[in-house]
Amino acid sequence: MGVAFVNTVFLLGLEGIKTVVEADVRRGMPSFKVVGLPSSVVEEARERVLSAIKNIGVEIGARKVVINLSPAEVPKKGAHADLPIAIALLKAMNVIDMDFSDVIVLGELSLDGRVRMSSSLFALIAQGIALGYKKFVLPHEAYSLIEVFSDVEFIPLDSLAELISGDFQWHKSHGHIRSHRRSVVKDFSDVKGQYIAKYGAMIAAAGMHNMVMVGSPGVGKTMIAERIKDILPPMSEQEIIEVSKIYSATLGKEELITDRPFRSPHSNTSVSAMFGGGRYAQPGEVTLAHKGVLFIDEFPEFRRDVLEGLRTVVENRQVFLSKADIKLHFPADFLLVMASNPCPCGYLGHPHKQCRCGVSDIKRYQRKFSGPLMQRMDIQLWMAPPESMEPDDLTTDVMKEKVLVAWNIQARRYEGEYFNGTAPDDMFLKHAYLSHEARSALEDIRHMGKDSGRELSKITRLARTLADVDEKDQVSDEHIWMALSFRKAMDVLVRFW
């Protein structure tokens, strides 16, 4: 009898915390205690572990067992602690003598000793590798998950008894990501009579420009938003692993996420649900939208603190979370698309229907159109009811091809780090390549009242993306004036007063 040590990983937010499971087994009054800030799920491991060990033929007898999870000051959550606790206990009892000093152990136990999948296993494997480990012991069901990573050795277990009998073997992963069938693609050809809005959506996707659409019900705002993710280029292997890790840690999805995310939270979403929080610092909707699209439909119905919180997130592309002595950051690199009616009834400015709202109701509703938030929306579209329902040439395939061309140009320009809509000002201005006529057009726009630095920067960035879609090296005055036309929604609303 004595003390044994086994390594595992716990998640704090999205970060992996290397944890040493220490087992101390001594003769004495029978007891089993788990310490080190375990959650109720981890505390309950003692019942699963004791039953599993007994049912594979090992008797613990009258012994005092203490399990410590180090570091002790970090909260521990997850049923994957079952297997490392059981192995540490068996080592302390001298039932097995395998060296686990450079191995990460993950897995839940059934009462008969079988090793099961546990929640967040893909994220735990990814974080274990990030911590420098290349050897794992885990459930046989996790075979396909660990195969995604390159040059990792692992033992897939069906039962705890296999470790005692020695009936196991090491395998090596090959870093193979199987291709998955894409989900059903919604085509932009379904959107009739909104050519300008569809073109604006294409520009938003091409340069990762945040977009807001304002218009009456039924003009196509939601249809356009739902189709934007399908014109974004496919995710790279690194992005697939990154997004899959987020969904594994947050939602417990143990499968590869190969389609770009599309998140559309409800208007009653709280601050912690949107940006992350809770006892175990779970990521929120903005992180679940990482590398995809976050759609805020009817945004004036959202809480003001939620909307204003988006301002810093869309600029920093990450969320900083501070809780007592814990400070974390979550990735939040997404395309923000927002939509709204112009008033509570939705028909302010409609050519054929009369608005039924009072002036005070409209003003109260439009207070959510805060200047600082709107200035961070590169594309501001006023969508009127279409006069014609004739089809146009902007289908999803055509738009996706143009977006891919623009992405490739920007990848060379910014070395794959940024887009026109996200590049730091100094880096963007170095690559803006404005013609003399474009600079003159910007000066004219400044004299028209669009004189804030952020407003002119947004127009310039949009113009650069328009030039990229046209495969032009220089930004022309035509691109500048077209960029200005995509920032008209707030001006239209002002004219109603």
Image: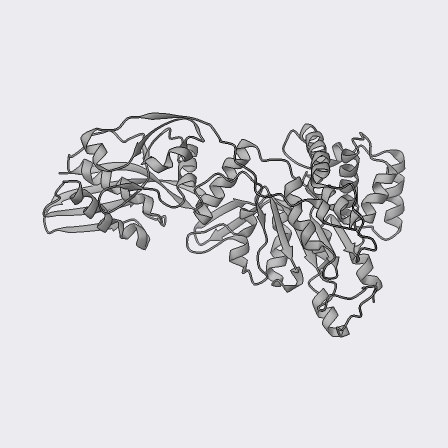
Q: Position of residue 277 (x, y in %)?
A: 48, 54
Residue at the image point whose x is 43% and y is 42% from the top: 254
Which of 64 and 156 lies nearest the eye of the viewer?
Answer: 156
Q: Is residue 267 above or below residue 48?
A: below
Q: Is residue 47 above or below residue 116?
A: below
Q: How has the structure been colored for display?
A: one colour
Residue 38 seen in this snapshot: no
Position of residue 320 in the picture relative to residue 372 (left or right): left
Q: Quadrant of residue 304?
A: bottom right
Position of residue 145 in the picture relative to residue 102 (left or right): right
Which of 215 and 450 lies nearest the eye of the viewer?
Answer: 215
Residue at the image point whose x is 41% and y is 44% from the top: 120
Q: Is residue 255 above or below residue 448?
A: above
Name the image quarter holding the C terminus. bottom right
Residue 474 seen in this snapshot: yes
Q: Position of residue 173 (x, y in %)?
A: 40, 26
Q: Position of residue 407 (x, y in %)?
A: 68, 33
